[in-house]
Amino acid sequence: IENRESGNKIQLKENGRGSYLMVVDIVGGGREEITVDSGAEENVCPWSWGEHQGTEEVDRKFLFRAAGGTTIEHYGKRDVRVTSPF
């Protein structure tokens, strides 16, 4: 991935199953891998991912479905700040 303004690039790493991962540092502590999914309309994560950032209530909950059709619970909104080599 390339930052158009700075020209800096970040390498993605293959996970061996057809997806790519970006390694980031979470502001406030921890390092995580994020799956890059260019086809996703919304992004989801496990409940515990970035929980130290808190969760905001939302006016309208989404009905998320996994690729296999099962329901993914929507608990609210969470903005997790990360840093990367950009």
Image: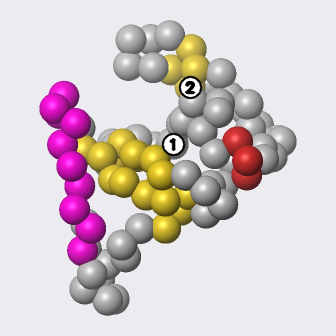
Question: Residue 46 in the image: x percent, y percent?
Answer: 57, 30
Seen at 41% across and 68% down, the residue is 84
- Tell which residue pokes out farthest to the front in this image: 29
Badge 1 marks a residue whose secondary structure is loop
Q: How many marks?
A: 2
Q: Are marks 2 and 1 in contact (CB under 8 Å)?
A: yes
- According to the picture, the residue beneath numbered tag 1 turns out to be 42
Give the CA distance from mark 2 to mark 1. Answer: 9 Å
Residue 50's image quarter?
top right
Seen at 32% across and 89% down, the residue is 6
Is residue 52 shown above or below 74?
below
Question: Residue 85 in the image: x percent, y percent?
Answer: 36, 72
Seen at 41% across and 46% down, the residue is 34
Is 12 within the magenta? Answer: yes
Would you say 26 lies left or right of 37 here? Answer: right
Majority SS type along the magenta span:
loop
Report whether residue 9 is seen.
Answer: yes
Q: What residue span does the magenta drawing correspond to? A: 9-18
Label 1 neighbour load within 10 Å: few <14, some 14-19, many 20+: few
Badge 2 marks a residue whose secondary structure is strand
Residue 16's image quarter?
top left
- According to the picture, the residue beneath numbered tag 2 turns out to be 64
State which tag comes first along the sequence, 2 or 1: 1
The amino acid type found where label 1 is placed reads Glu
Would you say 81 lies left or right of 21 here? Answer: right
The amino acid type found where label 2 is placed reads Phe
Question: Residue 7 in the image: x percent, y percent?
Answer: 25, 86
